[in-house]
Amino acid sequence: MTTQLPYITGWDIGGAHLKVARCDNKGIILDVIQISSPLWQGIEQLELAIQAAQKQLGNHDDIAAITMTGELVDIFANRQAGVNEILACLKNHISPDKIHVYAGDRNWLNITEAGNHWHQVASRNWQASANFVANFIENGVFIDIGSTTCDIITIKNNTVCTQGLDDHQRQLSRELLYTGAIRTPLIALTNMAPFNGQLISLAAEVFATTGDCWRLLDKLEITSIQDISSDGLPWLKTDCARRLARLLGTDAEEPLSQQWQQLAQWFAEQQIHQISKACLHVLSAHADLPTDTPIIGAGVGRFIAQLCAQRLDRPYLDFSTLITPSLATTADHAPAVAVALLAQQQFT
């Protein structure tokens, strides 16, 4: 009698969403889902999201591969407390003997070790994705643009090469940018915008976000957005135009007119330029990287990475092409997929 090897679930625990990917013991992706989990509202949001994922996937007996960024949210006194509270929450729903926490260069830790070595656990989901990509790509630049942040990671000779490992170091090196495709306030991109032939200063309020612009430009579908908009109203284009107008101190009386798309394009260009400049900054530390190496894009905002690849005259490769089966959702939630497949290689 043969015993079937267990399946693996990768859990990427963020501050706004829980991303979950499940694969079989041969590394075939079975499911990839995202569940809204506004962790800043309380740890019970994560509890509910875990329960919802388990109900949907039936993965209670899977090996659980864990990575996180949610320790940064402001309900926690500091990042160490965040890691430990998230681990404690996981123990309430997943048997501790099934939990393996991704710790970068330390590889995998059990739940007790993870608490003791929290520095190696906090915000290492980018490292799981980049190390997975490095198994397939000899030289390249991995760019993961999610709803909130952008990671820019260099790969040379099938090895991840970074100037820093924690968020503070990576923000210094611009390998981590706090700009994303949905949740970034537009006032963080620029304080001025052209409108009706004049340059107008913007209200210093979170009246509109990047999700409004990319919706108006048909780069995001409503079904791909689980975030709440800045005013709590839907992501219909009429709502997006109204939010943009509020930044200008006016109203969108004709919300579907071309002027709102043009304004959205202005903000989009600011974000593309910001990320392209950061890519050049990161690349300046790797002058030996061939100029024809690809940009590998991941995240719900990877269409921005593709636009940056065009700006930088580099080929573009989608993360999903490295996965079996090659599905868009695998690239949308790359860290969850990567941590599941890295665990499959290690434990089955």
Image: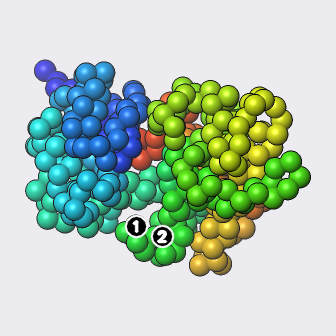
Q: Mark 2 falls on what kind of element?
A: helix
Instruction: Give the amino acid type for the residue marked by disc 1 in the picture.
Output: Asp
- Measured from the top left, where is residue 117 in percent x and y? 19, 66
Instruction: Give the amino acid type for the residue marked by disc 2 in the picture.
Output: Gln
Q: Which residue is mark 1?
A: 167
Residue beneath the point at 43% across and 56% down: 126
| Side of 282 relative to 103 (left or right) | right
Quarter holding residue 201:
bottom right
How far apart in space, not on screen, are marks 1 and 2 (Cα)? 6 Å
Q: Mark 1 falls on what kind of element?
A: helix
Are dots 1 and 2 in contact, CB under 8 Å?
yes
- Measured from the top left, where is residue 40 in percent x and y? 31, 47
Quarter holding residue 140:
bottom right
Residue beneath the point at 46% across and 44% down: 334
| Side of 220 relative to 313 (left or right) | left
| Side of 76 relative to 151 (left or right) | left
Determine if residue 67 is in view.
yes
